[in-house]
Amino acid sequence: MPADATATGVRHLYVTTPLYYVNGEPHLGSAYTILICDTVARFYRQRGYDTYFLTGTDEHGDKIAEAAAAAGEEPKAYADRISAIFRSTWEQSGLAYDRFIRTTDADHIRTVQEILQQVYDAGDIYFGSYGGLYCKGCERFYTEKELVDGKCPDHRTTPDFIAEDNYFFRMGKYQERLLTALAAKPDLVRPERYRNEVLAMLREPLEDLCISRPKSRLTWGIEMPFDDRFVTYVWFDALINYVTAVRSLGRERCDALWPAAQHFIAKDILKPHAIYWPTMLMAAGLPLYDHLNVHGYWTVDGQKMSKSLGNVVRPLDMQAKYGRDAFRYVLLRESVFGLDADFREDALVTRINADLANNVGNLVSRTLSMQHKYFAGAVQPLGEQRPEDAALAAAFAAAAREVDAQVAELMLSRALEAIFRAADHANKYIVETAPFTLARDPATKPRVGAILHNLLEALRSTAQLAAPFIPETATRIVELLNLPADALRVPGAAWGTAFPAGHVVRKPVPLFPRIEA
Ligand code: ME8
């Protein structure tokens, strides 16, 4: 669960994606992290939390300068262009973030310089010489031990040996404090496997961090406030964005949101987020984030996604082909947070047909068509609850509890499983209670009205529970039920109280047409 309520009683949640490098375009991996953040933010927003959701782009450093040069553009013009592609992709995907930050934004540059100056004044930044093995892909120095056969384990390239005078951050000084923080809060970094990786990194003495680049080698960066011959190392710059964004909201909201910060990343950038960033925060006298949530990698048909293999999955293409919610659903349903996952288009089609079309889609169309066929769309009294009605209501109540518990642990696929299990229960309830048979006899027609009323409640609950995961579908269900949008808020009406007798629901429209393979 996010951090506790403050004195005002309002709870807060601040979620962040990594700031994506502008050296490539959005793909399945970047889409996944932002989708998880969007879902978690929607979930807590629906429950009345003050949420703030940040994403954006990381635009300085060697890697971007090189990509711009390769494209024959000035770095800023190049960053403007690619950053706009990210922004428009996320907008077209319907992601409800609060700010799209760029590391070239003026307030960010100011915040980085302020923090650098503060840490420098406090004596935690010094000038020195260093020679080391540098991987441009990772934008960091490697120790011999970290390399695999002399190569960067991520990029499989041989790092360059670079020796120069630079500024260093006394990261090593904070090793013990970081260990204490990790011990005090066992799920600061989660899931546990990544916490263990961090603890393993901290078994070695923590070295100081080189945080500048001489302008003789790189000019595309934020100038060091105390020495204009240097620019800031891209990670020391980019990580600070998480603070820049909340500071721009004013003191009070910043103080409420910052301790409720949850960063979402994949395992590739664990070290900067689990080691550089908390020690930077300590040096700047700021509290640590609430959680660092680390997920695995997506592969495509069992292979690493890459331009050369031609298997890069583009979120907008998938959404155009299958719909936004279907794409969201499959990514969230087919992955376990923390573990690697494999994307296959055939599995996507199977999921859409089985879960979305056959289960929820069918439930909507069967219920609404019977409501229209037997009662011209008008809701009938609920009547006395029979055991099978109570069991249906109980199935949704249990799903609601399970969804809360699973989302708190980021087990979003399990949460979805619980929702679809309840919807499946409703489909079985139709078979079991057989309203289509009862409708033939005028004596049992009132019971048909009651059954359908229970089913409308099941649809309302399905929409409410599923809203953070498949928001457009939830909204469409609520529209078909002819209820106001706030019917999706949690907690909502108690079972049996959302539809007054005589309330008229709309005629069904297919939500998810079956896809022929
Ligand atoms: O590292 N599977 O940016 P980046 C899952 N600018 N997630 C993936 C993925 C995959 N195959 N590929 C990428 C950077 N991601 C820095 C971050 S933060 C202050 C600076 C996602 O563009 C995942 O979230 O390389 C991963 O951590 C991120 O993209 C890396 O994005």
Image (spheres, rainbow, N blue to C red):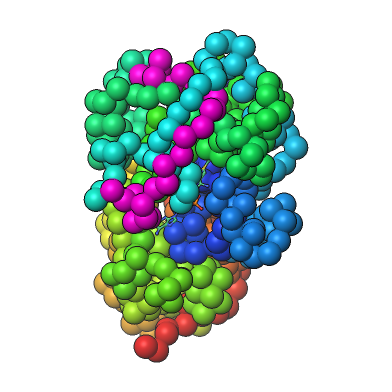
Q: Quadrant of the C terminus?
A: bottom left
* Most foreground residue, 18 or 124: 124
Q: Give how far across and how far down residue 30 sits, in percent.
A: 49, 57
Residue 170 part of the magenta segment: yes
The x, y position of residue 371, in whole percent, is 50, 75
User: Is residue 386 visible from the viewing direction of this image?
Assistant: no
Q: Residue at x 40, y 36 (%)?
A: 132
| Residue 259 vertical placement versus 84 (above, below) | above
Quarter of the N terminus within the rendering: top left
**434 left or right of 226?**
left
Q: Is residue 489 left or right of residue 100?
A: left
Height in image: 232 above or below 516? above
- Residue 251: which quarter of the image? top right
* Residue under the point 52% across and 46% down: 17
Residue at (54, 27) in percent of width and height: 166
Residue sticking out furthest to the top = 122
Image location of residue 356, percent across then percent down: 41, 72
Can residue 93 be seen?
yes
**Is 98 part of what is drawn in magenta?**
no
With 21 as the anchor, is 336 left or right in this view?
Answer: left
Examine the rendered structure and indicate whether residue 394 appears above or below residue 433. above
- Residue 383 on image: x %, y %: 42, 59
The residue sitting at 53% across, 17% down in the picture is 126
Q: How many marks?
A: 0
Magenta span covers which residues?
150-175
Of 40 and 309, nearer the camera is 309
